[in-house]
């Protein structure tokens, strides 16, 4: 256990995140949140032209080679943005032999939404939803799961992946998805570090963009 904790302390993490109109990178050195570096940028139709260039400007080749952990948000968000950042993350993972894991955009914001709305009771469930341009909503379900070793540490478990639903269950609270680039990047860094020892080098093969609809909807 001591060796694992020492490994965790020496890990450096890179995360990639996108929303409907922005994308960002986060870098944490030696699992120290005080070292966090963030990059956030709005995009129009030019993401495919600027993504790699902005990554190269954000992190040096030396630091990129030393990354031990890589995480990416897979949506729901702008479909093309999700697709592009997942492709980028998978490519980096293969090139530097680094484990890659993924989290839905709703799971990343779930802790922030639970805290804001004072949903703190253990095993309490709630939904996060996003309205579609057409009828219906995309929604995911989340459950409060306190850390047994540290009850004050709020942990959220995703029990239903975001999917298209006609109506939300009125018996459970539901909240509209609200992206926050800076807070979501920091939370993605935290999630990545908590999941540090649970992935393998070939984990990139299972990481795909999450979008319950076709890109045209």
Image (spheres, rainbow, N blue to C red):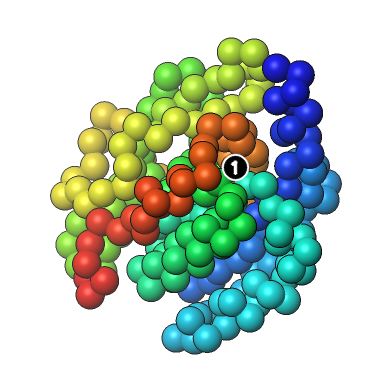
Q: Is 197 left or right of 174, judged from the image as shown?
A: right
Q: Is residue 82 above or below residue 205?
A: below
- What residue is shown at x 38% (from left), y 28% (from top)? 125
- What residue is shown at x 64% (from left), y 39% (from top)? 193
Q: Is 197 left or right of 172, judged from the image as shown?
A: right
Which residue matches tag 1?
192
Q: Is 217 left or right of 91, judged from the image as shown?
A: left
- What residue is shown at x 64% (from left), y 13% (from top)? 149
Nearest the camera: 174 or 47?
Answer: 47
SS at badge 1: helix
Nearest the camera: 183 or 118?
Answer: 183
**Quarter occupied by the C terminus:** bottom left
Nearest the camera: 124 or 216?
Answer: 216
Residue 30, quarter of the rendered image: top right
Q: Is residue 71 above or below residue 79?
A: above
Q: Residue furthest right?
A: 34
Q: Position of residue 31 (x, y in %)?
A: 76, 41
**Residue 95 visible to the viewer:** yes
Residue 142, quarter of the rendered image: top left
């Amino acid at each position: 256990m001591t060796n694992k904790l020492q490994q965790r302390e020496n890990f450096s993490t890179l995360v990639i995140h996108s929303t409907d109109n922005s994308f960002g990178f986060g870098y944490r050195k030696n699992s120290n949140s005080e070292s966090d570096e963030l990059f956030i940028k709005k995009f129009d139709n030019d993401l495919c032209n600027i993504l790699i260039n902005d990554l190269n400007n954000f992190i040096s080749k030396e630091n990129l080679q030393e990354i031990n952990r890589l995480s990416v948000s897979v949506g729901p968000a702008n479909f093309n943005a999700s697709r592009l950042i997942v492709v980028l993350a998978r490519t980096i993972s293969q090139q530097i032999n680094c484990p890659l894991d993924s989290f839905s955009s709703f799971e990343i914001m779930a802790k922030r939404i639970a805290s804001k709305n004072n949903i703190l009771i253990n095993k309490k469930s709630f939904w996060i939803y996003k309205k579609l341009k057409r009828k219906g909503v995309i929604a995911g379900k989340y459950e409060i799961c306190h850390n047994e070793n540290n009850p004050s540490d709020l942990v959220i478990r995703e029990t239903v992946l975001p999917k298209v639903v006609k109506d939300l269950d009125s018996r459970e609270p539901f909240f509209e998805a609200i992206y926050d680039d800076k807070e979501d990047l920091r939370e993605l860094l935290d999630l990545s570090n908590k999941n540090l020892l649970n992935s393998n080098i070939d984990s990139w093969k299972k990481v795909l963009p999450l979008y319950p609809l076709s890109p045209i909807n």
